[in-house]
Amino acid sequence: MDSTWRTLSWLLMVLLSLGIAAYAGSLLVYPPMRSSFVLALLADRPVATLGHFGGSAIALAVGCFQVHPGLRRRVAAVHRWMGRLYVIGVAIGGAAGLYMARFANGGIAGKLGFALLALAWLGTTACGYASIRAGAVAAHRRWMIRSFALSFAAVTLRLYIPASHAAGIPFEAAYPAIAWLCWVPNLLVAEWIARSANSTHPAPRPEGGLALR
């Protein structure tokens, strides 16, 4: 039952991640889908907007498969190449997101929430990369779980916004809180998962090549 629940949870995460990644990608290649908000972003900050959407879409689409332990074991070479792609996506999306946080809605609370999200996303990914380069597989696993939890903020953000609207909370009041709620709970859950996974499934010794080398 526990295994079935984990599989269903992972599948739901994959569907949500791929859905948001596809949405972000479609905004880049299919202009009729762009809302007035997205059009304004592209007009004011085109490079940062394209980088944030594109990098985040790559990180979501790749990362949801990277965190599955069975896939890591069965297709290690694919895992390594997808890991490289994930790091590139985070680097582009995170750097662009950090720049765009200066202009976020929600006042100081909104700007600070999204800036810290970008910094944490870049930082956890950098730690994961450095860990695997050093051969610290268990540490790499923990850091990348945290990293993808922050990638998943793109999904939870888009769940909280309609939920707050349905609850009758004005956007101006909800958005500063959502700037934090979209990633802080994710990171807390990731920390619990990372520690649980490490205690029940010790990392194997690296063989033949490390995940991002």
Image (cartoon, rainbow, N blue to C red):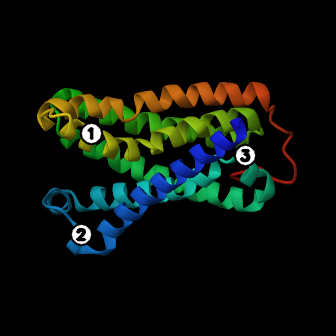
Which one is in front in this view, the residue at disc 2 or the one at disc 1?
1
Check if mark 3's residue and mark 1's residue have beta carbons within 8 Å.
no
Dot 1 falls on a residue whose secondary structure is helix
Reading the chain from its start, which is encountered first: label 2 or label 1? Answer: 2
In the image, is 147 to the left or to the right of 117?
A: right
C-alpha separation, residue under disc 2 versus residue under disc 1? 22 Å
- Residue 12 at x, y percent in the picture: 52, 49
Q: Position of residue 206 (x, y in %)?
A: 84, 44
The residue drawn where x is 38% and y is 41% is 156
Q: Amino acid at mark 3?
A: Pro
Q: Position of residue 84 (x, y in %)?
A: 61, 56
Type of amino acid under label 1: Ala
Which of the pair 62/160 is nearer the observer? 160
Look at 32% across and 29% down and name the residue there: 180
- Where, quadrant-wise, is the N terminus in this rendering? top right
Under circle 3, the secondary element is helix
27 sits left or right of 91 in the view: left
Q: Count residues near mark 1 (Cα–Cα under 10 Å), then give few for <14, some for 14-19, many for 20+.
A: few
Tell me which corner region of the image, top left, top right, bottom left or bottom right, holds residue 139: top right
* Quarter-of-image position of residue 160: top left
Residue 19 falls in image quadrant: bottom left
Q: Earlier in the sequence, mark 3 or mark 1?
A: 3
Please say if 6 is above or below 18.
above
Which disc number belongs to residue 103?
none
Q: Residue at x 23, y 73 (%)?
A: 31
Q: Which mark is residue 69?
A: 3
Q: Which residue bears the numbered disc 2? A: 33
Q: Is residue 74 visible?
A: yes
Mark 1 highlights which residue? 163
Q: How far across and down, in percent of the image, does residue 69 sit?
A: 72, 46
Q: Taking the image as drawn, is residue 136 in sight?
A: no
